[in-house]
Amino acid sequence: MAVLVIADHDNASLKDSTEKTVTAAKALSADVDVLVAGQGVDAVAAEAAKIAGVRKVLVAESDALGKQIAEAVTAAALPLAAGYDAILIPATAGGKNVAPRIAAKLDVALISDIVEVVSADTFVRPIYAGNALETVQSSDAKKVVTVRATAFKAAGQGGSATIEKVDAGAGAAKTRFVSDEIVKSDRPELAAAKIVVSGGRALGSADEFQKVIEPLADKLGAAVGASRAAVDAGYAPNDYQVGQTGKVVAPQLYVAVGISGAIQHLAGMKDSKVIVAINKDADAPIFQVADYGLVQDYKTAVPELMDALAAAGK
Amino acid sequence: MKILVPVKRVIDANVKVRVKPDQSGVDLSNVKMSMNPFCEIAVEEAVRLKEKGAAAEIVVVSIGPAQAQETIRTALAMGADRGVLIQTDDDVEPLEVAKLLQAVIGQEAPELVLMGKQAIDGDNNAVGQMLAALLDWPQATFASKVEIEAGKAKVTREVDGGLQTLEVDLPAVVTADLRLNEPRYASLPNIMKAKKKPIDVKSTGDYGVDVKGHLKVLKVSEPPKRSAGVKVETAADLVGKLKEAGVL
Ligand SMILES: Cc1cc2nc3c(=O)[nH]c(=O)nc-3n(C[C@H](O)[C@H](O)[C@H](O)COP(=O)(O)OP(=O)(O)OC[C@H]3O[C@@H](n4cnc5c(N)ncnc54)[C@H](O)[C@@H]3O)c2cc1C
Ligand SMILES: Nc1ncnc2c1ncn2[C@@H]1O[C@H](COP(=O)(O)O)[C@@H](O)[C@H]1O
């Protein structure tokens, strides 16, 4: 049994979710290959080759793959599928876009967002915004699975896989890339950060979000997240959203500022190691999951926290 | 242009779901059911396209129990024209939903399928992409903006690092993200009017799709519970606790 992992990357560097997906793959098989589909991905392929336990890195390149167009990624992956019993893909927005397309082309079910590998055909996945866990057994000969990276440890480094070029496939005749607006940030990547500071509707404006949340994140070396309400109101960009329909994070420390703790938000952060909530309403549901709760107006709490961190040498 | 909108009846987003003690599933008795929020957004977008003159007819399709008729009526009250209910009490998996929709599309020949990105019960996020694959149509998922122009759709999508805009040839499948629009509430006159709009009731057998599925649910369990921790009085106390916990 061999497993193909489709790498998550931005053509320049490999995302941490790939290494975690390799760990899930190793629970299925000792023979794990990684497909890097993109454009100008030599550095990404080299990084993938260093992941411990990876046998082979397959590289497919084209313009459409560089933009992660689902039709193109599917066309590159399908000819390889015959050689594998399972295809594992990180459950990022990009992975969720392509995995079901590949599964349908193979006429198999998609097993989405797994948090545990029970056996070669049985997996655990959250449903209902993480309010229940479903254990499912697949009767398909070939499995297509997306993996919730936060539920697995990184595979680690030390590998020396071979790198091989493969055919890029037919591309995407009916889809054209127009433009993108990628948010540039020097902060750690949200999905992989050790500390995340998130702001909610309480912040009231984009300006206030920047004045309050960002300096606190900088001080902690943290990534910045947001509730849906904050994103919808335009206080923060869409890719900051944490939750059922945004990103799932599980950092060492999650600080929620002015977030009520709706189940859809909790779905994205309740597996964090330590949760801190700052909220002026002592009855806010976020306190039911917070390890440390500070019932205060963020306007006093955050500046005091900045001072206390400075006093502690941060 | 004809638009097809698949809609799913799911447990309401505000209900706290409970796992059944025998671990056979979640308890759906006496809980409020609603249209999946993402499907509502898809219906709204279709209605707006019709209001702008970009679409002539909106057909909604639901696969589910007899009560899914109410979900279809909700869409009709929002402005859709007619409905198709493929009635079944089975839990139909995304691939089979996609195959049933493919069969409906074979009859209806829409130029655009607008649907939710995810149903908030199974949280699969799969049917749209699967349907596009089966039809060999282009897909534009997680849409936050849709513009239709001469046989094409320009779609802005929510991607990992921000936004991406694609142009797809029609027919295509577009799946809606939360920020695409804010669905309207149906007005009373429109709710009355919706009662007279036609709903065709079919069975899965009518489409020759085997809905037995590929996945067997062995059990549904309660996730590990997090308990409430402690309240701290000041920011300085908080920093002390965080140092003790070793996370600073
Ligand atoms: C289908 C669906 C999917 C969804 N997906 C997501 C998702 O992925 N992520 C997500 O986050 N949400 C999601 N939501 C929305 C979710 O239900 C909530 O509406 C949202 O999380 C609320 O955001 P909030 O906590 O910032 O705002 P609110 O609920 O308005 O909470 C604001 C909080 O700030 C506190 N506050 C106000 N002023 C101050 C102050 N000065 N100092 C301190 N505290 C203050 C208040 O006490 C309150 O608790 C989804 C909803 C649906 C229906
Ligand atoms: N039973 C169903 N009937 C109609 N449409 C459905 C059904 N299940 C899923 N869909 C559509 O597919 C979208 C994504 O669902 P899913 O892939 O199950 O998360 C939903 O928002 C609906 O538009």
Image (cartoon, coloured by chain):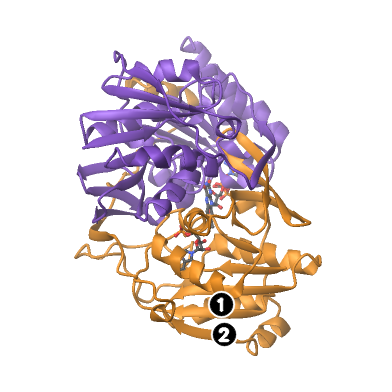
Chain colours: A purple, B orange
Residue B161, how many percent across, how many down? 58, 32
Q: In the rendered structure, which disc, 2 or 1, sits on the residue that comes first in sequence?
A: 1
The residue that label 1 is drawn on is: B72
Alpha carbons under labels 2 and 1: distance apart: 8 Å
Residue at figure coordinates x 58%, y 37% from the top left: A239
Residue reaching furthest bottom? B196
Q: Camera-side residue: B144 or A185?
A: B144
- Would you say residue B206 is visible in this rendering? yes
Q: Camera-side residue: A210 or A61?
A: A61
Q: Camera-side residue: A262 or B87?
A: B87
Q: Could you confirm whether marks 2 and 1 are on the same chain?
A: yes
Residue reaching furthest top? A313
Residue B5, how many percent across, how many down? 59, 68
The picture quadrant where one finds residue A291 is top left
Q: Residues within 10 Å of mark 2 (few under 14, many from 20)?
A: some
The nearer-to-camera label among 2 and 1 is 2
Residue A169, how many percent across, how many down? 50, 37
Q: Are marks 2 and 1 in contact (CB under 8 Å)?
A: yes
Residue at figure coordinates x 21%, y 37% from the top left: A1
The residue that label 2 is drawn on is: B199
Q: Chain of mark 1?
A: B
The relative height of residue A13 versus residue B133 in the rendered view (above or below) is above
Residue reaching furthest right? B53
Residue A170 shown left or right of residue B21 in the figure: right
The relative height of residue B64 versus residue A225 in the rendered view (above or below) is below
Q: Amino acid at mark 2?
A: Ile
**Mark 1 Cβ and ligand 2 under 8 Å apart:** no
Q: Amino acid at mark 1?
A: Ile
Residue B156 shown left or right of residue A257 in the figure: right
Q: Name the mark on residue A183.
A: none
